Image: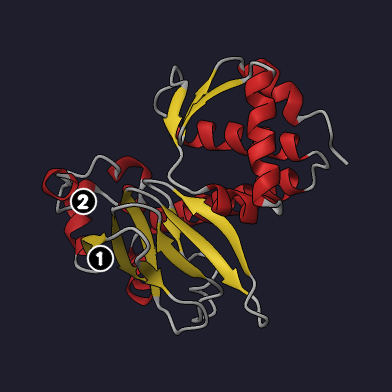
Amino acid sequence: MQKNKAASNCVECVLAKQCVPSGMPANKLFRFENIVQTNIPYKMGEALFQQHTETSFLYVVKTGSFKTKMISPHGTEHVHNFFLPGEVIGLDSVGLGMTLNSADALEASLACKIDYPSLRMLRKEFPTLSDFSVKLYSTALASMSRVQNIISLQSASSRLAAFLILYHSRISSSNLQLSSFQLPMTRQDIASHLGLAVETVSRSFSKLIDTGCINKDGRKIQILELKKLEQLANSSAR
């Protein structure tokens, strides 16, 4: 059903105002559509791209969600980040022409694939695209900074609280009243992302429930006391 409802062109896409073509005049969007493949379907667990492979593409999440992960030479996996609709994957790799990590779908998802060399050519014709590119990179850097701040927290429950607050803010940008949401990632993914053991994540969820901050039903999270959750997130910074 996801695939049938998704618009096949940029003009009709619900994400158009926050996506790359928002930096172009409406009557010139066809130029951008010529360099992008839209509505590429990915099954849960399917790879968007693999680590250490040549790349010249950016990917925009249209529906669903993805995770990026890095594999060390010793085979250890670290979940680097999570990406939601409207967010761009591959900004850290496309300039080098080599992927720094792998990206997998967390659920049935759709993504759009942008040819970066062609996008660079378009930027020369449409200066507003360059302005949007600066905004895009700035947003990506800010996201990385927030993730690093979360990992710097000493308390495991504080890390988890900060993670939930950040995730909540990202999915509720268009609906500030949203208090319940579904986590697409597993506890293992969260643990890897936060640098914690899976058992520690489970205990931290229990603590957040016991303190009245959240309710949890499977992967469904309901924030009951946002201020209390924020206080817990800020209570153990190094």
Tell me residue 194's x, y (percent): 67, 50
User: Badge 2: how crowded within 10 Å, few (<14), some, or many (20+)?
Assistant: many
Q: Residue at x 37, y 43 (%)?
A: 18
User: Badge 1: how crowded within 10 Å, few (<14), some, or many (20+)?
Assistant: many
Tell me residue 153's x, y (percent): 80, 42
Residue marked by disc 2: 10
Tell me residue 212's x, y (percent): 64, 15
Q: What's the coloring here?
A: secondary structure
Using residue 11 as the reference point, say whether residue 54 is left or right of it.
Answer: right
Residue marked by disc 1: 36
Label 1 and label 2: CA atoms lie apart by 9 Å
| Furthest-left residue in this view | 4
Q: Secondary structure at mark 1?
A: strand
- Which quadrant of the structure image shows residue 125? bottom left
Q: Residue at x 56, y 15 (%)?
A: 224
Q: Are marks 1 and 2 in contact (CB under 8 Å)?
A: yes
Q: Is residue 150 above or below residue 104?
A: above
